[in-house]
Image (spheres, rainbow, N blue to C red):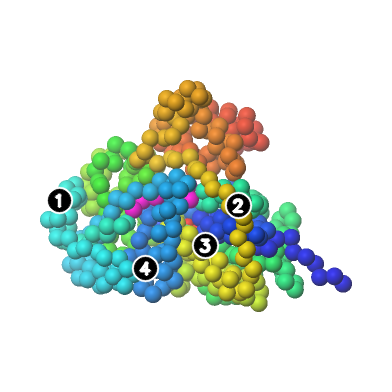
Amino acid sequence: METPQATYDVAIIGGGVVGTAIARELAQYRLNIVLLEAGPDVGVGTSKANTALFHTGFDAPPGSLEARLLKRSIKRLKCYAQEVGIPIEYTGGILVAWNQEQLTKLPALQNDAQKNGETLHPLTAGQIYQKEPRLGPGVLGGLMVKEEGIICPFTPPLAFATQAKINGVDFLFNHLVTNITQGENITYLACQQKTINAIWVINSAGLYSDKIDHLFGYKRFKVTARRGQLIIYDKASRSLLSHIILPVPTQTTKGVMVCPTVFGNLLLGPTAEDLPNKHDTATTHDGYMSLQKMGRQILPALQQEEITATYSGLRAATQHKDYQIHLDEKQHYICVGGIRSTGLSSSMGIAEYVVDLLREANVTLQPTETFKTITMPYIGEDRQRKVSHNPYRIKQNPDYGRILCHCEEVSRGEIIDAMNSPLPPPNLDGLRRRTRCLQGRCQGFYCTAELVEIMAQWGSMSKHELLAINQ
Ligand SMILES: Cc1cc2nc3c(=O)[nH]c(=O)nc-3n(C[C@H](O)[C@H](O)[C@H](O)COP(=O)(O)OP(=O)(O)OC[C@H]3O[C@@H](n4cnc5c(N)ncnc54)[C@H](O)[C@@H]3O)c2cc1C
């Protein structure tokens, strides 16, 4: 009997920020690649609900893979962000000690940061109040984390995926991998619709990366969903703060912080709650109350500010203190699991590391002759949008002057561009992550009807279907 030929060289399971970064990195080589995603879009898991700090990794365990890959990623992501248009602001962070116990932990933190290649400068309480006069009473001292920044959480996975797609990667959405079998030089990934086969499989299934690892016959780690609830304050609050206000981290969490967002809001959170299931992204009364209590202490003026929204995300926490990245050469399998709290910042470093592992396994990696570049729609608040508000572009296309989402100032032209992009949004949430519409003060009260109208006209779903899946 003839040995069956694999359809794909590489199959990536999971289209979060990690899986899409890997897809983009591998698209630079002559490989036939497919990405299988259980959801209808990229970035719909943990990657869409985080704090969106651009971490330096100063508090990562020194010598860990996480620390190394963060370091590698930061440089890369900084350049890539400039190249394609990912909003990043280098606000700097101030790590604040509010009690004696936290104060005594600062030298060790400074020491660990030094080992990770980051110099943190000690600050007295007076210096901290000078930089951030609205902080609550009780600051005892702290550390300046100069390089810490904020990043758009939505554009990175979209940019990675878009670039991968235009460079030939196949994206299969609504493809949940339910079973895995292996033959000689070929792995079969059973999905509800069909079975996909590939020579190599990369597991970047986030919260379910342990499940996929089990299907390959391993029990190396168990993922526990660690929920983080967050509160977003109205844009009017943005002027209360210039830096990210970081707490002293504990063994289990980086702790509750107050930070600006690239969309011009303030963010308070996240909580850290280990859950028995992996899908409970509800926000709770207790979570809200505990955040409000912390907020009162850190920045009392927040109490007077309007809340725009609350949300929660689930970290893929494991029993280990490091990423779970394993190469299993014989099985042609790479596990990229347990990317707990820093995956947005480390995504490009992780992707490069996966390429290193494939090289280590003697996979032939021949660069493609043409790797197409991209420019993403810039959705940060720090610069003027390239299209709406731009008289020249409005003259060319009046739709850029027709504002539909007044809270976030998104024009009809930008919505139509998103619908015509290489990876169009499948639903309203996808449109929000691509353009910022619906995420402002009115939370879609005024613009949903018109947005649905356009999506139905340019996409494949009817208005009723779009509204039904938005419930
Ligand atoms: C509250 C919170 C705050 C955070 N703050 C920060 C921060 O400030 N900075 C930072 O850098 N990081 C932060 N993180 C961490 C960061 O968000 C994650 O590390 C990152 O998003 C993980 O990406 P991922 O691709 O591994 O997982 P995901 O985004 O969850 O992607 C995995 C994908 O796999 C798919 N999938 C799962 N199982 C299957 C299957 N069987 N078949 C097909 N598809 C499947 C899922 O649908 C999902 O889309 C935070 C996380 C949380 C929760």
Dots 2, 1 in contact, CB < 8 A: no
Q: Residue 351, labelled with which disc?
A: 3
Give the x, y percent position of residue 41: 58, 48
Q: Secondary structure at mark 1?
A: helix
The answer to which quarter of the image holds residue 98 is: bottom left
| Residue receiving disc 2 | 370
Q: Amino acid at mark 1?
A: Gln
Which residue is at the front of the view, 34 or 269? Answer: 34
The C terminus, quarter of image? top right
Dots 3, 1 in contact, CB < 8 A: no
Kindly report the distance in space between the C-alpha atoms of the residues bearing marks 2 and 1: 52 Å
Residue 148 position (above or below residue 402): below
Query: How many marks can you see?
Result: 4
| Residue receiving disc 4 | 60
- Residue at the image position 36 percent from the left and 73 percent from the top: 62
The first of marks 2 and 4 along the sequence is 4
Give the x, y percent position of residue 450: 53, 27
Give the x, y percent position of residue 48: 48, 50
Question: Relative to residue 288, is residue 103 drawn left or right?
Answer: left
Question: Relative to residue 185, is residue 268 drawn left or right?
Answer: left
- Residue at the image position 64 percent from the left and 32 percent from the top: 462
Q: Amino acid at mark 2?
A: Thr
For label 3, the crowd category at 10 Å Cα-Cα, with few meaning under 14, some 14 to 19 and many 20 or more, is many
Between tags 3 and 2, which lies in front?
2
Between tags 2 and 4, which lies in front?
2
- Residue at the image position 31 percent from the left and 72 percent from the top: 115
Q: Amino acid at mark 4?
A: Ala
| Residue receiving disc 1 | 130
Question: Does the magenta-highlighted stretch encompass residue 264?
Answer: no
Span colored in magenta: 149-156
Question: Does the magenta-highlighted stretch encompass residue 155?
Answer: yes
Q: Secondary structure at mark 4?
A: loop
